Image (cartoon, grey):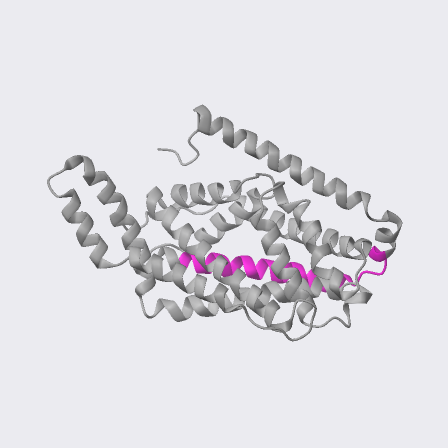
Amino acid sequence: MNILTRIEGPAGLWKARRSWFLAAGGLVLLVGVGARVSWSQVRAALHGLAWPWLLLAGALTAISMGCRAWRLSAVLGKGLSFPGTWRCVSLGYFASLFLPLGGGELVKAAALRHRFGLPLTRVGTALAVDRMFDIALLLALLGAVAGHGWTGRPGTVPLALGIAGLLALAGFLAISGRALRGRLRQWAAGKPRRRIWLDRFEEIHDQAAALRNVSLLPRLGLLQAAIFFVDVLSAWCCLLAFPAGAGLPFAAPLRVALFVMLAFALPLLPGGLGSHQAAVILALTPFGFGPAEALSVSLVGEVVHVATLTTLGTLALARPPREPAAPK
Protein backbone atom coordinates (compact mmCIF):
# COMPACT_ATOMS: atom_id res chain seq x y z
CA MET A 1 0.00 0.00 0.00
CA ASN A 2 1.33 3.42 -0.95
CA ILE A 3 2.46 5.52 1.98
CA LEU A 4 0.77 8.53 0.43
CA THR A 5 -2.57 6.75 0.30
CA ARG A 6 -5.49 9.09 -0.10
CA ILE A 7 -7.55 9.59 3.04
CA GLU A 8 -11.29 9.72 2.41
CA GLY A 9 -14.40 10.18 4.49
CA PRO A 10 -14.83 12.30 7.64
CA ALA A 11 -11.21 11.83 8.70
CA GLY A 12 -9.95 13.17 5.38
CA LEU A 13 -12.38 16.10 5.53
CA TRP A 14 -11.24 16.98 9.05
CA LYS A 15 -7.60 16.80 8.00
CA ALA A 16 -8.25 19.11 5.05
CA ARG A 17 -10.10 21.59 7.25
CA ARG A 18 -7.36 21.42 9.88
CA SER A 19 -4.73 22.31 7.27
CA TRP A 20 -6.78 25.31 6.21
CA PHE A 21 -7.25 26.42 9.84
CA LEU A 22 -3.52 26.15 10.50
CA ALA A 23 -2.67 28.01 7.30
CA ALA A 24 -5.12 30.75 8.28
CA GLY A 25 -3.47 30.92 11.70
CA GLY A 26 -0.07 31.28 10.07
CA LEU A 27 -1.32 34.08 7.82
CA VAL A 28 -2.87 35.88 10.79
CA LEU A 29 0.43 35.56 12.62
CA LEU A 30 2.34 36.96 9.64
CA VAL A 31 -0.03 39.88 9.24
CA GLY A 32 0.09 40.58 12.99
CA VAL A 33 3.88 40.61 13.01
CA GLY A 34 4.04 42.75 9.88
CA ALA A 35 1.59 45.27 11.25
CA ARG A 36 3.55 45.77 14.48
CA VAL A 37 6.94 46.61 13.00
CA SER A 38 8.38 49.58 11.18
CA TRP A 39 9.55 48.32 7.80
CA SER A 40 11.90 51.26 7.43
CA GLN A 41 13.64 50.06 10.60
CA VAL A 42 13.73 46.52 9.18
CA ARG A 43 15.44 47.81 6.02
CA ALA A 44 17.87 49.82 8.13
CA ALA A 45 18.73 46.74 10.22
CA LEU A 46 19.45 44.77 7.05
CA HIS A 47 22.07 47.26 5.89
CA GLY A 48 25.67 46.40 6.68
CA LEU A 49 25.14 42.65 7.06
CA ALA A 50 28.33 40.62 7.51
CA TRP A 51 27.80 38.11 4.72
CA PRO A 52 30.65 35.75 5.73
CA TRP A 53 28.73 34.95 8.92
CA LEU A 54 25.62 34.13 6.87
CA LEU A 55 27.61 31.88 4.54
CA LEU A 56 29.00 30.11 7.60
CA ALA A 57 25.46 29.75 8.99
CA GLY A 58 24.39 28.10 5.73
CA ALA A 59 27.37 25.74 5.83
CA LEU A 60 26.54 24.79 9.43
CA THR A 61 22.93 24.13 8.43
CA ALA A 62 24.15 21.77 5.71
CA ILE A 63 26.43 20.03 8.25
CA SER A 64 23.47 19.66 10.63
CA MET A 65 21.48 18.05 7.82
CA GLY A 66 24.33 15.65 7.15
CA CYS A 67 24.55 14.71 10.84
CA ARG A 68 20.79 14.05 10.90
CA ALA A 69 21.07 11.83 7.83
CA TRP A 70 23.98 9.97 9.46
CA ARG A 71 21.90 9.51 12.60
CA LEU A 72 18.96 8.09 10.63
CA SER A 73 21.31 5.83 8.68
CA ALA A 74 22.68 4.47 11.96
CA VAL A 75 19.15 3.90 13.30
CA LEU A 76 18.07 2.08 10.12
CA GLY A 77 20.98 -0.34 10.49
CA LYS A 78 23.64 -1.88 8.30
CA GLY A 79 23.23 -2.46 4.59
CA LEU A 80 21.97 1.04 3.73
CA SER A 81 24.39 3.52 2.20
CA PHE A 82 24.81 6.92 3.81
CA PRO A 83 24.61 8.80 0.46
CA GLY A 84 21.24 7.19 -0.23
CA THR A 85 19.91 8.06 3.21
CA TRP A 86 21.25 11.60 2.84
CA ARG A 87 19.33 12.02 -0.42
CA CYS A 88 16.09 10.87 1.22
CA VAL A 89 16.57 13.17 4.21
CA SER A 90 17.44 16.13 1.97
CA LEU A 91 14.34 15.52 -0.15
CA GLY A 92 12.20 15.39 2.98
CA TYR A 93 13.50 18.68 4.34
CA PHE A 94 13.27 20.28 0.90
CA ALA A 95 9.63 19.19 0.59
CA SER A 96 8.90 20.68 4.03
CA LEU A 97 9.40 24.10 2.44
CA PHE A 98 6.25 23.56 0.37
CA LEU A 99 4.14 20.95 2.19
CA PRO A 100 2.34 21.65 5.48
CA LEU A 101 1.40 19.26 8.30
CA GLY A 102 4.53 17.15 8.24
CA GLY A 103 4.43 16.57 4.50
CA GLY A 104 8.20 16.53 4.42
CA GLU A 105 8.22 13.48 6.71
CA LEU A 106 5.90 11.66 4.30
CA VAL A 107 8.21 12.48 1.41
CA LYS A 108 11.20 11.28 3.43
CA ALA A 109 9.43 8.01 4.29
CA ALA A 110 8.31 7.45 0.69
CA ALA A 111 11.84 8.13 -0.58
CA LEU A 112 13.37 5.65 1.89
CA ARG A 113 10.83 2.99 0.98
CA HIS A 114 11.29 3.49 -2.76
CA ARG A 115 15.07 3.77 -2.71
CA PHE A 116 15.88 0.84 -0.44
CA GLY A 117 12.75 -1.31 -0.75
CA LEU A 118 12.12 -1.10 2.99
CA PRO A 119 8.80 -2.17 4.55
CA LEU A 120 6.60 0.66 5.71
CA THR A 121 6.69 -0.46 9.34
CA ARG A 122 10.50 -0.40 9.41
CA VAL A 123 10.59 3.07 7.86
CA GLY A 124 7.93 4.37 10.24
CA THR A 125 9.69 2.94 13.28
CA ALA A 126 13.08 4.33 12.25
CA LEU A 127 11.58 7.77 11.69
CA ALA A 128 9.81 7.58 15.05
CA VAL A 129 13.13 6.74 16.75
CA ASP A 130 14.79 9.57 14.85
CA ARG A 131 12.08 11.93 16.09
CA MET A 132 12.77 10.79 19.64
CA PHE A 133 16.31 12.09 19.26
CA ASP A 134 14.89 15.41 18.06
CA ILE A 135 12.73 15.49 21.19
CA ALA A 136 15.86 14.79 23.23
CA LEU A 137 17.54 17.71 21.44
CA LEU A 138 14.58 19.92 22.30
CA LEU A 139 14.82 18.88 25.95
CA ALA A 140 18.55 19.58 25.93
CA LEU A 141 17.92 23.06 24.55
CA LEU A 142 15.24 23.66 27.17
CA GLY A 143 17.62 22.57 29.90
CA ALA A 144 20.48 24.67 28.52
CA VAL A 145 18.30 27.77 28.20
CA ALA A 146 16.93 27.31 31.70
CA GLY A 147 20.43 26.67 33.00
CA HIS A 148 21.63 30.00 31.60
CA GLY A 149 18.44 31.75 32.62
CA TRP A 150 15.70 32.78 30.22
CA THR A 151 17.14 36.29 30.05
CA GLY A 152 20.83 35.42 30.37
CA ARG A 153 20.89 35.29 34.19
CA PRO A 154 21.63 32.07 36.10
CA GLY A 155 18.67 29.74 36.44
CA THR A 156 17.87 26.11 37.15
CA VAL A 157 17.53 23.18 34.77
CA PRO A 158 13.98 21.76 34.76
CA LEU A 159 14.54 18.23 36.03
CA ALA A 160 10.95 17.30 35.22
CA LEU A 161 11.69 17.62 31.50
CA GLY A 162 14.69 15.34 31.78
CA ILE A 163 12.66 12.80 33.72
CA ALA A 164 9.94 12.92 31.07
CA GLY A 165 12.52 12.22 28.37
CA LEU A 166 13.93 9.27 30.32
CA LEU A 167 10.43 7.86 30.83
CA ALA A 168 9.74 8.13 27.10
CA LEU A 169 12.98 6.31 26.33
CA ALA A 170 12.17 3.63 28.92
CA GLY A 171 8.75 3.12 27.37
CA PHE A 172 10.26 2.71 23.92
CA LEU A 173 12.82 0.24 25.15
CA ALA A 174 9.98 -1.69 26.78
CA ILE A 175 8.36 -2.00 23.35
CA SER A 176 11.60 -3.46 22.04
CA GLY A 177 11.87 -5.90 24.94
CA ARG A 178 11.77 -9.65 24.49
CA ALA A 179 9.08 -10.21 27.11
CA LEU A 180 6.45 -8.29 25.14
CA ARG A 181 7.49 -10.07 21.97
CA GLY A 182 6.96 -13.48 23.61
CA ARG A 183 3.54 -12.52 24.92
CA LEU A 184 2.40 -11.34 21.51
CA ARG A 185 3.55 -14.60 19.95
CA GLN A 186 1.42 -16.48 22.45
CA TRP A 187 -1.50 -14.15 21.72
CA ALA A 188 -1.25 -14.84 17.95
CA ALA A 189 -0.57 -18.58 18.22
CA GLY A 190 -3.09 -20.58 16.17
CA LYS A 191 -4.98 -17.45 15.07
CA PRO A 192 -4.10 -16.46 11.49
CA ARG A 193 -5.98 -13.15 11.65
CA ARG A 194 -3.74 -11.98 14.48
CA ARG A 195 -0.63 -13.03 12.63
CA ILE A 196 -0.53 -9.85 10.52
CA TRP A 197 -0.35 -7.74 13.68
CA LEU A 198 2.42 -9.94 15.03
CA ASP A 199 4.37 -9.59 11.77
CA ARG A 200 4.13 -5.82 11.99
CA PHE A 201 5.28 -5.85 15.60
CA GLU A 202 8.18 -8.14 14.67
CA GLU A 203 9.41 -5.54 12.17
CA ILE A 204 8.99 -2.74 14.70
CA HIS A 205 10.74 -4.79 17.37
CA ASP A 206 13.68 -5.64 15.14
CA GLN A 207 14.14 -1.98 14.24
CA ALA A 208 13.81 -0.79 17.85
CA ALA A 209 16.12 -3.51 19.15
CA ALA A 210 18.91 -2.04 17.02
CA LEU A 211 19.28 0.66 19.67
CA ARG A 212 20.35 -1.99 22.16
CA ASN A 213 23.60 -2.38 20.24
CA VAL A 214 26.23 -1.12 22.68
CA SER A 215 28.54 0.02 19.88
CA LEU A 216 25.74 2.08 18.30
CA LEU A 217 24.83 4.19 21.32
CA PRO A 218 28.14 6.14 21.58
CA ARG A 219 27.92 7.01 17.88
CA LEU A 220 24.35 8.23 18.25
CA GLY A 221 25.32 10.20 21.35
CA LEU A 222 28.17 11.94 19.55
CA LEU A 223 25.96 12.72 16.56
CA GLN A 224 23.30 14.14 18.86
CA ALA A 225 25.87 16.35 20.61
CA ALA A 226 27.17 17.51 17.23
CA ILE A 227 23.67 18.41 16.05
CA PHE A 228 23.07 20.37 19.27
CA PHE A 229 26.22 22.47 18.96
CA VAL A 230 25.97 22.94 15.18
CA ASP A 231 22.37 24.20 15.43
CA VAL A 232 23.30 26.65 18.19
CA LEU A 233 26.39 27.84 16.29
CA SER A 234 24.29 28.36 13.15
CA ALA A 235 21.89 30.56 15.12
CA TRP A 236 24.84 32.44 16.61
CA CYS A 237 26.31 33.08 13.15
CA CYS A 238 23.02 34.63 12.03
CA LEU A 239 23.13 36.92 15.06
CA LEU A 240 26.78 37.84 14.50
CA ALA A 241 25.90 38.97 10.96
CA PHE A 242 24.21 41.98 12.62
CA PRO A 243 26.16 44.68 14.49
CA ALA A 244 23.94 44.21 17.56
CA GLY A 245 24.80 40.52 17.75
CA ALA A 246 28.47 40.97 18.67
CA GLY A 247 27.98 41.48 22.42
CA LEU A 248 25.20 38.96 23.04
CA PRO A 249 25.65 36.24 25.67
CA PHE A 250 25.57 32.55 24.78
CA ALA A 251 22.00 32.39 26.09
CA ALA A 252 20.82 34.37 23.02
CA PRO A 253 21.63 31.75 20.34
CA LEU A 254 20.39 29.05 22.72
CA ARG A 255 17.03 30.80 22.97
CA VAL A 256 16.86 31.36 19.21
CA ALA A 257 17.66 27.71 18.46
CA LEU A 258 15.07 26.55 21.01
CA PHE A 259 12.27 28.87 19.88
CA VAL A 260 12.91 28.17 16.19
CA MET A 261 12.79 24.42 16.82
CA LEU A 262 9.47 24.86 18.61
CA ALA A 263 8.24 26.99 15.70
CA PHE A 264 9.08 24.29 13.14
CA ALA A 265 7.27 21.76 15.33
CA LEU A 266 4.11 23.89 14.95
CA PRO A 267 2.93 23.28 11.37
CA LEU A 268 1.19 26.49 10.34
CA LEU A 269 2.59 27.43 6.94
CA PRO A 270 5.19 25.62 4.80
CA GLY A 271 8.75 26.58 5.64
CA GLY A 272 7.76 27.74 9.12
CA LEU A 273 6.52 31.11 7.85
CA GLY A 274 4.79 33.10 10.51
CA SER A 275 5.74 30.88 13.41
CA HIS A 276 9.46 31.38 12.65
CA GLN A 277 9.13 35.17 12.74
CA ALA A 278 7.12 35.14 15.98
CA ALA A 279 9.60 32.71 17.58
CA VAL A 280 12.67 34.85 16.84
CA ILE A 281 10.94 38.01 18.10
CA LEU A 282 10.02 36.28 21.36
CA ALA A 283 13.53 34.82 21.68
CA LEU A 284 15.40 38.12 21.23
CA THR A 285 13.11 40.56 23.04
CA PRO A 286 14.81 39.98 26.47
CA PHE A 287 18.17 40.94 24.92
CA GLY A 288 17.09 44.43 23.89
CA PHE A 289 16.10 43.65 20.30
CA GLY A 290 13.11 45.61 19.09
CA PRO A 291 10.47 43.91 16.89
CA ALA A 292 12.00 45.35 13.72
CA GLU A 293 15.54 44.17 14.56
CA ALA A 294 14.32 40.72 15.61
CA LEU A 295 12.20 40.43 12.46
CA SER A 296 15.22 41.27 10.31
CA VAL A 297 17.16 38.47 12.04
CA SER A 298 14.26 36.10 11.36
CA LEU A 299 14.04 37.08 7.69
CA VAL A 300 17.76 36.59 7.18
CA GLY A 301 17.68 33.25 9.01
CA GLU A 302 14.71 32.17 6.89
CA VAL A 303 16.55 33.04 3.68
CA VAL A 304 19.61 31.07 4.82
CA HIS A 305 17.39 28.11 5.77
CA VAL A 306 15.45 28.10 2.47
CA ALA A 307 18.57 28.60 0.33
CA THR A 308 20.42 25.77 2.07
CA LEU A 309 17.53 23.29 1.90
CA THR A 310 16.84 24.20 -1.73
CA THR A 311 20.49 23.63 -2.66
CA LEU A 312 20.62 20.28 -0.85
CA GLY A 313 17.24 19.24 -2.27
CA THR A 314 18.35 20.09 -5.80
CA LEU A 315 21.51 18.03 -5.35
CA ALA A 316 19.42 15.15 -3.99
CA LEU A 317 17.14 15.28 -7.03
CA ALA A 318 20.07 14.56 -9.34
CA ARG A 319 19.95 11.10 -10.88
CA PRO A 320 21.35 8.79 -8.18
CA PRO A 321 23.10 5.46 -8.72
CA ARG A 322 21.08 2.33 -8.14
CA GLU A 323 20.94 1.10 -4.58
CA PRO A 324 20.99 -2.60 -3.70
CA ALA A 325 17.94 -3.93 -1.92
CA ALA A 326 18.08 -3.48 1.85
CA PRO A 327 18.55 -6.59 3.98
CA LYS A 328 15.35 -7.91 5.52
Q: Is residue 195 left or right of residue 32?
A: left
Location of residue 169 by image quarter: bottom left
Please state which of residues 63 and 26 is positioned toward the viewer in this rendering.
26
State the residue at coordinates (33%, 44%).
121
Is 18 one of the magenta-colored residues? no
Q: Please tell me how many numbered marks the rendered image carries.
A: 0
Of helix, strand and loop, which mostly describes the magenta segment?
helix
**Where 33 falls versus 177 (above or below)?**
above
Residue 264, x across and y down, in percent: 59, 50
Q: Position of residue 62 (x, y in %)?
A: 59, 58
Residue 67 part of the magenta segment: yes
Please state if 252 lies on the left or on the right of 165 as rendered: right
Res. 118 visible in picture: no
In the picture as drawn, the residue positioned furthest to the left comes out as 190
Can I make out residue 317 in this image?
A: yes
Question: What residue is shown at x 49% (from left), y 63% (from top)?
Answer: 161
Residue 105's place in the image compared with 2, above or below, is below
Q: For the magenta stretch, what is the residue range?
A: 45-73
What x and y, as percent, mark residue 43?
A: 86, 51
Q: Residue at x 30, y 55 (%)?
A: 175
Outermost residue, top direction?
9
**In the image shown, does 71 or 166 lie closer to the viewer?**
166
Q: Position of residue 85 (x, y in %)?
A: 44, 52
Task: Give the quadrant of the N terminus.
Answer: top left
